[in-house]
Image: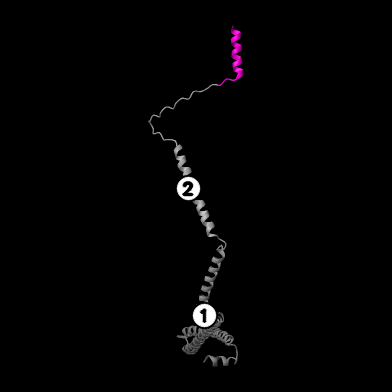
């Protein structure tokens, strides 16, 4: 149905453009129908007023007005049904156009995924991950080998450990020897033993001795 509808509007046209043109044409026709309906509704109202005004005074005029009113109402009903069909067709075209654009977008997305994935599959991904793991192990082994000192002498390490042990022993001995000179803590209230007073020798220089000798001579 869609293909035949498109062929009616110009043969081999772009489906998207053909759908847009058809929708535009249908909407323009709907606008014309709406204007026609407004005109008919006004005519119906006018004929109703005429019939009402002449219902008592002139029944013939009132009868003709009612006939014209009835004809306008019939035409209005027909236009209403036509407008409904056009609206349904517009909705169908818009839905079909949206579906076509959606399918085109999904197709492009699927093609893009194919390009991205290429020849990749689950088995190839697993093989690649195994290769990555192997290469990582090789890199770690190379780093360990580079960091190892090939010229290290085991005897030299033993000498260094022995020297370190001797230094540690000397430090401990010095700490133990220093413990003998630690001041004794005297608790509050305890009496500390008096220390022996050492004799203080007063040394006199030659000038002071000569001064005292001179003072003694003057006193005589």
Q: Quadrant of the C terminus?
A: top right
Q: Magenta part of the protein: which range?
A: 203-220
Is 128 colored magenta in this rendering?
Answer: no
Q: Which residue is mark 2?
A: 169
Helix, strand or loop under label 2: helix
Closest to the observer: 48 or 26? 26
- Dot 2 or dot 1: first in sequence order is 1
State which quadrant residue 9 falls in.
Answer: bottom right
Instruction: Verify whether residue 214 appears in magenta.
Output: yes
Image height of 205 relative to 134, above or below: above
Identify the residue shown where x is 50% and y is 78%: 126
Q: Are marks 2 and 1 in contact (CB under 8 Å)?
A: no
Q: Residues within 10 Å of mark 1 (few under 14, many from 20)?
A: few
Q: Position of residue 135 (x, y in %)?
A: 54, 73
Q: Position of residue 131 (x, y in %)?
A: 53, 75
Q: Residue at x 50, y 54 (%)?
A: 161
Please name the predominant secondary structure of the magenta segment in the image: helix
Residue that appears at 57% across and 65% down: 146
Bin the neighbour count of mark 2 within 10 Å (Cα to Cα): few under 14, some 14-19, many 20 and up: few
| Residue situated furthest front in the rendering | 155
> In this rendering, which labeled residue sits more in front, label 2 or label 1?
2
Q: Could you say which disc has been placed on residue 124 in the image?
A: 1
């Amino acid at each position: 149905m869609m293909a035949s509808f498109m062929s009616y509007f110009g043969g081999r046209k772009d489906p998207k453009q053909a759908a847009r043109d058809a929708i535009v044409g249908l909407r323009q026709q709907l606008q014309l129908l709406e204007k026609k309906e407004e005109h008919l509704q006004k005519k119906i109202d006018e004929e109703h007023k005429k019939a009402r005004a002449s219902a008592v005074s002139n029944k013939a005029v009132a009868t003709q007005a009612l006939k014209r009113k009835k004809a306008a109402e019939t035409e209005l009903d027909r236009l209403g049904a036509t407008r409904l069909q056009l609206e349904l067709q517009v909705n169908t075209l818009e839905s079909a156009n949206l579906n076509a654009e959606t399918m085109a977008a999904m197709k492009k997305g699927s093609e893009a995924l194919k390009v991205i994935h290429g020849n990749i599959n689950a088995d190839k991904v697993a093989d690649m991950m195994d290769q990555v793991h192997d290469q990582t192990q090789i890199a770690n082994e190379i780093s360990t080998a580079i960091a190892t000192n090939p010229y290290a002498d085991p005897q030299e390490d033993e000498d260094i450990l022995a020297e370190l042990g001797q230094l540690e022993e000397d430090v401990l001995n010095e700490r133990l020897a220093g413990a003998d000179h630690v001041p004794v803590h005297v608790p509050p209230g305890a009496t500390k033993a008096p220390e022996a007073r050492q004799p203080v020798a007063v040394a006199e220089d030659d000038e002071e001795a000569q001064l005292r000798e001179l003072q003694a001579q003057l006193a005589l």
